[in-house]
Image: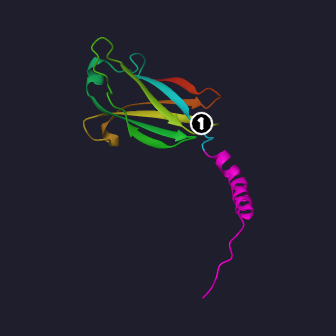
Amino acid sequence: MKTFKATPMKHVVRRLGAVATLALPFLAGAGCNTYKYFDINVSFDSSGPTAFDDSSVGQIHTCVVNVTGADKTTFELLHCPSMNAEAPFETGSFEYSSYASSGTIDFEVDAYVGLKTTPDCLAGKGTIAVPVNGATTITGNLV
């Protein structure tokens, strides 16, 4: 039969202290990323050669946001267009958050007629390049 020698409590405490000391750099780095928040106001252009009118905005059914640059994702923009009779060209704002700490985040909104998000249903496109800076909340206007 094997016997086990009891380790004095002093050695256990020293070992735990060494493990805790090794873990500190890892724990100190955990959670240090901070979000940047982007508030992007979206509206339809109502002037110029590629302008929307009340009728063409009314035909939009789907808006897709493509994010590229310092971050990447794609999502559908809800309530686009807004169907607000008093401000038919204003869709409102969307919020986006990212861990990006530098560079530029490019937002592109593609507006589609019908229910398909295919090139032949694309009615309009707007883009904005937003530099990531030291601010926690960064705003932009996308037309």
- Which region of the structure is painted magenta? 1-30
Q: In this view, does 143 lie to the left or right of 87?
A: right
* Quadrant into which the C terminus falls: top left
At x 53%, y 35%, the residue is: 106
Residue 77, horizontal then vertical, whole percent: 37, 33
Residue assigned mark 1: 34
| Above or below, comparing residue 12 to residue 134 in the picture | below
Label 1: state its secondary structure: loop
Q: In which quarter of the image is residue 4?
A: bottom right
Q: In which quarter of the image is residue 10?
A: bottom right
Residue 72, horizontal then vertical, whole percent: 51, 43
Q: In which quarter of the image is residue 75?
A: top left
Q: Is residue 116 left or right of residue 91?
A: left
Q: Is residue 130 left or right of residue 46?
A: right
Residue 131, horizontal then vertical, whole percent: 61, 30
Answer whether residue 7 is magenta in the image: yes
Can residue 8 be seen in this snapshot? yes
| Above or below, comparing residue 116 to residue 124 in the picture | below
5 or 140: nearer the viewer: 5
Residue 11, horizontal then vertical, whole percent: 74, 64
At x 27%, y 14%, the residue is: 85
Q: Which residue lies furthest to the top in this view?
A: 86
97 or 53: nearer the viewer: 97
Q: Which amino acid does label 1 sit on?
A: Thr
